[in-house]
Amino acid sequence: MRVLVTGASGFIGRAVAEALLRRGDGVVCAARHPPSLRQDGRACENLPVDLSKVPAVEWWVPRLAGVDAVVNAVGILREQGAQTFRALHADAPIALFKACASAGVPLVVQISALGADDQAQSRYHLSKKAADDCLRGLPVRSRIVQPSLVYGPGGPGSKLFNQLAALPMLAFPRGGDMLVQPVHRDDVVDGVLALLRSPDTQPGTIAFVGPRALSLRDYLAQLRAALRIGGKLRMLRLPESLFRWAAAIAGHVPGSSLDSETAAMLLRGNAAPSEQFTRLLGREPRAVSAFVPEAQAQAVRTEAVLDAWLPVLRGAIALLWLWTGVVSLGWYPVPDSLALLERVGLHGALAKLALYGAAGLDLLLGVLTLAASARWRGAVWAAQLLLVAGYTLLITLFLPEYWLHPYGPISKNLPLMAAIALLWALEPKPAQPAAS
């Protein structure tokens, strides 16, 4: 079988393409940047295509020659630039599906989303539904699969839920009682392969879901246990309006998986009967307790804890610099600050310049800790380390008694420097140019 997979560089599409190669099928990987996949000496055929530009039906038809099945796995959780829900979930797939009908492709498998139905309200679900509805009306044999929350390595949603599960306390509307039915990516892939083998015995639309519906609270608690994180997850009730407001703010944070769209989908819930999917797989889908293999639990746990707490640590260090700067500008008595500077050897105008200059530098470092781009954050962490080390050295030389202060105003610089060094060490490395 020769299968064209769109979205082949994505979370689900890549896994489907790899599984097809392992099975011995020919695979055409269609993506903006097709992955270099190879299994047992077989490689996928790469078809570079930017679906956000919505290739026309006429563009697709000749490229579908000799294709036995198409799997559309294109999907985004958040819009970014030209990558919109309408383009990637609706317009581009609709053009592809029409081309499949025109070219006589024997089978189309559309990976949609649970919730893309008549009750859909979010733009994510409505765009998926538009493509589903179009495919149902075309003269081509098709199957539409609608996964619930999909969990697996590298998934943006998986990372978010791991991060939430790692926290000791959360606040959600209704105390997290909304229903979800998470499904593992490997089960989704197995379901797609089963449909490609025997589509005629399956219904036209099938929900790909876990074995049973869970409250979001229970899902996170079970995921916390799967990650081997001790302690009980406490869930507080949060007003829905406040949750939506916080999600709207989070939507402006680069890399955030939470925004107004995902918040609305969580509030709606995401569950369906699992019997059809169980029959398709020939077994029960994985439970949440089996989502994280024991051999990988420690690594996934570490990543989840860091993802959860590094933003808190970064915010705390930014607040420290901002607060120090504000206090130095006058909330702490200026004569007392100048008296300390005299003991360091600074007097008069030079002392005031040092006081207000240091306060301004502290404020700047606080702002840059929050706002600097990834390109410059390394320099920000280095400047902070040098400044704290410099302050510590000066106080050690001129005010050594502060080392013996019971509240530890200087000794606390040591864990502060360690925290800054940790944040610096965990900054993503810049991408290396590809070898020619």
Image: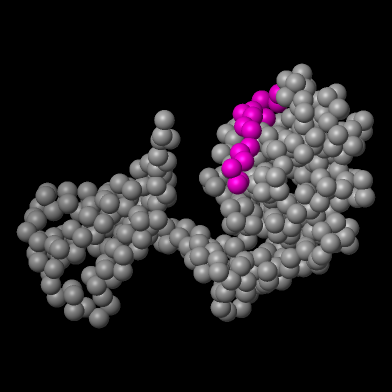
**Residue 37's x, y, as percent?**
59, 42
Q: Nearer the viewer, residue 69 or 21?
A: 21
Identified at 23% across, 55% down, the residue is 387
Q: Is residue 24 left or right of residue 119?
A: left
Regarding residue 107, the answer to whether it shows in the image is yes
- Please tell me which residue is depicted at 13% across the width and 68% down the height of the picture: 396
Is 137 situated left or right of 254 in this image?
right
From the viewer's perspective, is 431 left or right of 291?
Answer: left
Span colored in magenta: 39-56
113 and 127: which is toward the camera: 113
Which quadrant of the structure image shows residue 289?
A: bottom right
Check the image and name the residue furthest to the left. Answer: 345
Q: Position of residue 307 (x, y in %)?
A: 51, 60
Position of residue 338 measured from the top left corner of the image (x, y, whole percent): 16, 60
Q: Quadrant of the N terminus?
A: top right
Q: In the rendered image of this protein, does residue 379 appear above or below residue 426? A: above
Which residue is at a point 80% across and 41% down the rendered structure image? 110
- Vertically, is 76 above or below 394? above
* Residue at the extreme top: 58
On whether residue 50 falls in the magenta region, the answer is yes
Against 317, residue 166 (above or below) is below
Judge by depth and name the residue closer to the eye, 204 or 228. Answer: 204
| 372 or 341: nearer the viewer | 372
* Magenta span includes 344: no
Looking at this view, name the residue that lies furthest to the front: 41
Q: Is residue 218 above or below residue 122?
A: below
Q: Position of residue 121 (x, y in %)?
A: 80, 45
Identify the residue at horizontal 42%, vertical 62% (top origin): 313
